[in-house]
Amino acid sequence: MSAAARSEDGRGPKTTLEQAVPAYFGLETPTALAEAIHRERIAMRRVIELPPVVFAEAEHDDVAAEIVARLASEVATLAHVALQRLELEREPTELLLGGGLLQSADGRLTAAIEAEVRAVAPVFHVRTARSAPIVGAALLGLDELGAGRDVQERVRRELGAAIESLERSAPAPKALDRSFQTDARAKPARPDDGTASGAFEGRPEGG
């Protein structure tokens, strides 16, 4: 939203996000979108739907590409710090990306994160979690209880469906009387692969 608004009013470089972002909501300009959110015609929380728009525009727009590159760099830096603290820089290690922002990304973002981290951790692999982070937290608890895979799969399925239902029915927050900006902070996700054993895993079984 910030890049689109800055493109429209001249404070920032021109970007196709100026057209693509409001167009996603059926509007023509960032100003019209800001007004619609302020007047609660569009829920402010719907800005979380925009990452796929940015990823698509990044294929041909420098500003969008810079946003994606900055996200990749932030996630890679966070992963590198975690690897250092866990002393896993030389160990076969897997990073699971979770949360709506990273789960909506395409393969290029994952590849960019992996390439940047591999510069300091050669045996590093990145993949995207299938479910919301809270599902991974629940699976972690089930691991501690010794629950079987059938129970974990049921929790993944039913809790995931409940989260999606809550997100669809959540009331819109009150609009704020200010220009709004997005400031994504990527956080490592708990895994959801059926064995919730931490955001970073050491040497894989059989490896």
Image (cartoon, grey):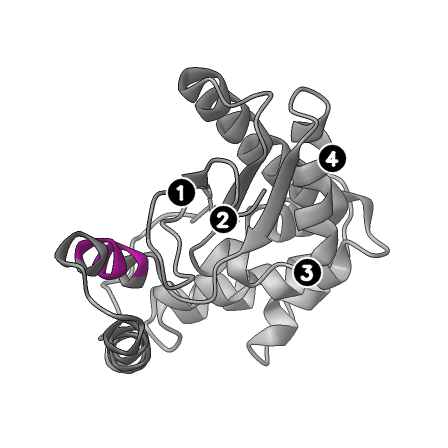
Q: Earlier in the sequence, mark 1 or mark 3?
A: 3
Nearer to us of marks 1 and 3 is 1
Locate residue 184 relative to residue 118 in the image: left or right.
Answer: left
Which secondary structure, mark 4?
helix
Q: Quadrant of the C terminus?
A: top right
Where is residue 185 shown, x and y percent of the image?
A: 44, 39
Please name the residue that numbered disc 2 is placed on.
96
Please name the residue that numbered disc 1 is placed on.
199
Disc 1 crowd, CA 10 A, few/some/many (<14, 14-19, 20+): many
Please name the residue that numbered disc 3 is placed on.
106
Pick out the residue farthest to the front.
206
Along the viewing direction, whichever of 118 and 116 lies nearer the viewer: 118
Along the viewing direction, whichever of 170 and 80 lies nearer the viewer: 80
| Residue 50 position by quadrant | bottom right
Nearer to us of marks 3 and 4 is 4
- Residue drawn 83% across and 56% down? 59
Amino acid found under the numbered disc labelled 4: Ala
Along the viewing direction, whichever of 27 and 145 lies nearer the viewer: 145
